[in-house]
Image (tube, rainbow, N blue to C red):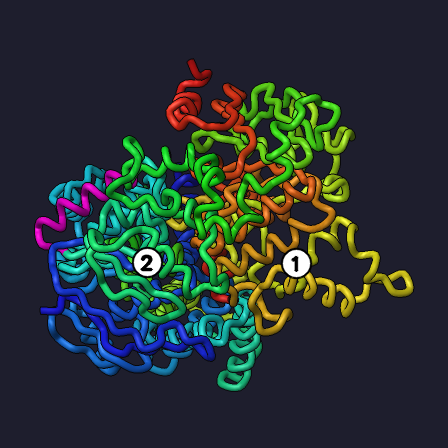
Amino acid sequence: MNEFYAFSNSVLLGTTPILWAALGCLFAHRAGIYQLGLEGLMLIGAFASIGGAIAFGSAWTGILLAIAACVVVSALFWLVVVILKANAIIAGLGLVGIGLGGTSFLQRVIFHTSGAVSAKAVIPTPVAGTATGPASILGSLSLLVYLLPLAVGVVWFVARRSNFGLRVSASGQYPFAATAAGVNVRWIQLGALCITGAMCAIGGSALSVGSLHAFSYDMTAGIGYVAFTAVLFGREAPWGVVLASFIFGIATALGIFSQIHAIFGLPLEFIQMMPYVVTVLALWFAGWRWPQAGNAAAGAFLELRE
Amino acid sequence: MVVLGCRDVLVKFGETVALDGVTLSWQSAGTVHAIVGQNGAGKTTLCRVFAGLTRADHGQVIVGGVEYPPSGQARLRKAGVELVHQTFALPPHFTVAEALQLFRSDGTRGGFYRRGAIERRWAGQLESFGFSIRADAFIRDLAPEQLQAVEITRALASGSRIIVLDEPTAVLPPEAIDGLFARLRVLATQGITFFVVMHKLRDVRAIAETVAVLAGGKVVLPPTEMSTISDTEIARLIMTGSAQSSVSGASVRAMGLHDEGRTLDDGGSEAGPLDVSVAVAQGDDEVAQDSGASPMVAQDSGASPMGDPALAGGQPDSSASSAIMRVEHVSTVTREGRRGLQAFSVDVHPGEVVGIAGVEGNGQQALVDVIVGLEAPREGHVILDGRDVSHERVAVRRRLGLRYIPADRQSRAISLSSSLWVNAMAAPVSSGYGVSGAVRRGFLSERLLRRSGEERLRRWQVRYASSGQAMRELSGGNLQRIVLAREVDEGARLIVAEQPTQGLDLGGTELVWDALRRARRSGAGVLLVSSDLDELFALSDRLVVILGGERVAVLRPPYDRTALGQAMVVGAAS
């Protein structure tokens, strides 16, 4: 039983950054923009929150700084993709490069190290890691995990039950209708991208100030791409994205779990490959089962290039 | 008081003048007013100017007696003139309630809504305007007339009393048009003023109380009571602005008119002014008989059906050996696994137009796809010029003389982003015919190809600035001209024309009909697939009726509309 609790704990830990980023990316997708730069945004968020936590002595201030940084970067991404009409895929990959290189550069300039930068100020963990029994499921998980149900509810409400949500999906699915309704598609897309940026910042912070209490080079290790996939696999619907993120979270947890317990005697590397295998299989499944999924974003993307 | 009007309105798009000093005014509210004119006459631009969507370069718009100069565009947009677009501005993945909510975000608290609440609210609105549409239905599941109803509801819900409908009948199946008109009439009695932009005079006659005519961006007829003007006069005014200075018999018939001299009030016993069918069913014969006496038809002697040697020679011989194309017992299965064609046979002879009549979706698409080579028959054969091409590539078929005028212009016929000459030459180059003159040292020369493309464009009188400009810059009629320039050439032996005049105005329709008639005269066979019965009657030497993928009847002129209707719906005519 204890092993089940420990495993559930790993699932929550692994799902949290994926879900924060994916919930944000949902808005970019619904607005018709492929935001492939989640990985870069999460790295910037992770770095900025550690930097802020060190500078101001508060992890919450660190997260605010991270949000601010990612919103600014997202606005620049909007400028490049929507206004200057660059290819969103290429710009997204560029954003990942900027995230990787930029955080590594600033790490050397500000902290004079290429190793890990740790902060003393962290996000509170309501249940201690020493807890036993069912409570150990939540052991040493930060408040950012507890905030997730609230975030899911708010995202669902904004995406599915608000005028802003209607405008976002009209802009993505059928810009002509949005324009006819007096909606400025570009401004809506800016808003959607900024929400994506802010939530990626929290996702990145969940990794740094929220769990490892440190920043190290490329600490996201592909979580951004997994989150992007979760949005496709979740068919751009809030609940679908939650489900997809949990599937990827479970695959991640299996990887961590296998370092401690041998699973069917399979090699460790094989188990650690699982999250990515699951990602590829999910993409294949989504493409086969719902060939039109993601078309909305692709369609608007084509339109933007015109 | 002036309900709606404009004074001296000038609108330019770059070098093109769309509206050239237009002055119009309508006085009576609670009525239906028509605005007619050819494609490119400036009707849509005028609608957009009224709704405040396009800014005039000069002049005033008058709404409810208030003048709005170009600088007052933002105020004009709130003045309550609602435009119902030709293309529906409704996102397919939305429910009806969501789509309406997108346009009218009131009734929400803090920008949030409850689904049940907006569904009830919009269901009530739809019902109050007389539309029975579920508010929780998805837009993508609605029929065109329902989409239009949602758009009209959207416009009315804003509290607007003036609604402009841009080509409302163009998107509707014929049987839905009466319903729309009935609805507009009821709403008009409640004080709503409608402005409808239309192509077909028959529709104008059916709904409008006044008509105004635009030609070449100018007003050629100010709003005039329908009862004081004849269709022939309106038709003349519409055509004055076109490149063709004369009104041909074809265009008059295209508009659903009787032959010259017969006015609406003393029309034939059953040929009421609104019932064009009878006129057209007998039209070809009647017009031909008195073609000498009718000046309008006389000018068109070349295009008049009776002027055709092929037709004058009587029915083409139906022996299979002389056919240019034979479809023999072809059966197909659609991608969804449903049955397409059912042992369908049809042959087309040189110098013959064979019409395919049927309610849409009864296998017409499969038939066209099998002939042009986009789909292989499951059973049966397609013989082109004596050769079995059932499984041959498109290029082989084109080299044998197959030509295709697709219904879906934008995805099948042309590339909007490519240049004019490329569009005119793409098929010859990719199929390898008619380009031997452009070969230099074993390679195709772009310069020579372009020259040959320009020659085609000139021959078809396409109006363009440079043959290198993109297709999207041309108007609908000009686009179809380029399709014709490519598909109706010397090498054409069999032309498959699929809804060739859909969305075209009178001038464009006349051009296409003319082209097909000329092709027939020069010995090509034409397979005409159309849902426009007037068109089928006017052009076809023979009508093959398709129902559920089966051939259920063959009709010969003189056509009987009732018999055809019965064959189309229930199969074999009695």
Residue B267 belongs to magenta span: no
Q: Which residue is mark 1?
A: B424
Residue type, label 1? Ala
Q: Which residue is mark 2?
A: B36
Return the residue nearer the eye: B224 or A85.
Answer: B224
Visible in this render: residue A289?
Answer: no
Return the residue nearer the eye: A286 or B546.
Answer: B546
Position of residue B497 measured from the top left corner of the image (x, y, whole percent) = 57, 42
Q: Is residue B174 above or below residue B515?
A: above
Q: Name the residue at 70% across, 45% down.
A: B492
**Among the 4 quarters of the image, the one containing residue A168:** bottom left
Is A76 placed left or right of B23 in the picture?
Answer: right
Quadrant (top left/top right/bottom left/bottom right) for the C terminus of chain B: top left
Magenta region? B176-192
Q: Report helix, strand or loop for mark 1.
A: helix
Return the residue nearer the eye: B294 or B52.
Answer: B294
Q: Of all residues shown, which one is farthest toward the front?
A: B293
**Among the 4 quarters of the image, the one containing residue B441:** bottom right
Residue B180 belongs to magenta span: yes
Visible in this render: residue B505?
Answer: yes
Q: Give the main secondary structure, helix, strand or loop, of the magenta stretch.
A: helix
